[in-house]
Amino acid sequence: RAAGNIVRKLAPKPGVPDTLASLGSLLTPSRALSMMKLAGLRQRDGVTCGPTVAVVAGALLDPGYREALQTPHLFHAEQGRVHRLVNRFWPRRLGTTPVGVARAISAHSPVRYRWRLFRGLLPGGRDALSDVLSAVRAGRPVAVLVGRFLPRHWILVVGAGEGRLHCYEPS
């Protein structure tokens, strides 16, 4: 898939330590994803990629939340709960908004997640995604909305290296 129009931008929450980053190389998001055994768990239907990415990101950032999601049944139920929570005014059949995904991830994060447009699609624009790369190198997963002409699918960047992004694909 081509790079999408929206990427998450991170801003530290005042007074909250970045605990995952402080673990350094002991627990990277890629390693945590493997440890959680969530790599095989998928979104429950065609419109829950956003909530699924938010749940996985929250589990990567919050060990207590991660423990609560160790079975497929609980993982699927949590997707539905998050979808209802973040889409109060947006029709669920249209997926999840960038603001909703950012809010859902922030609930389990030591940093506040925000969204921004992918500047590479603007006239004359370039976007090296340096904020995305910085975040994943610091141990923070980044939700990205992707699509060729119309961004409609969420993925989660959990690592970067050797010129590649390592992603959790929920579908």
Image (cartoon, rainbow, N blue to C red):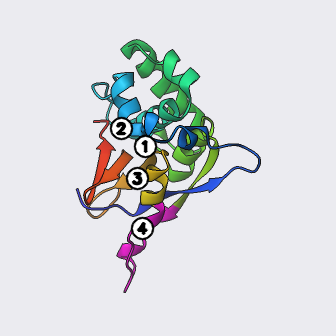
**Residue on which disc 3 sits:** 144
Mark 1 in CB contact with mark 4 (< 8 angstroms): no
Between the residue at mark 1 and the residue at mark 2, the CA separation in whole angstroms equals 25 Å
Left or right for 140, reference 167 = right
What amino acid type is highlighted by mark number 2?
Answer: Ser
Mark 1 in CB contact with mark 2 (< 8 angstroms): no
What amino acid type is highlighted by mark number 3?
Answer: Val
**Residue on which disc 2 sits:** 30
Q: 43 above or below 7?
A: above
Q: Secondary structure at mark 3?
A: strand
Between the residue at mark 3 and the residue at mark 2, the CA separation in whole angstroms equals 16 Å
Left or right for 149, reference 109 = left
Q: Position of residue 140 (x, y in %)?
A: 49, 45
Left or right for 66, reference 122 = right
Circle 2 packing at 10 Å, graded few (<14), some (14-19), many (20+), is many
Query: What residue range appears in magenta?
Result: 116-131
Question: Can you say which quadrant of the picture contains the C terminus?
Answer: top left
Front residue of 154 and 47 = 154
Q: Residue furthest right?
A: 15
**Residue on which disc 1 sits:** 95
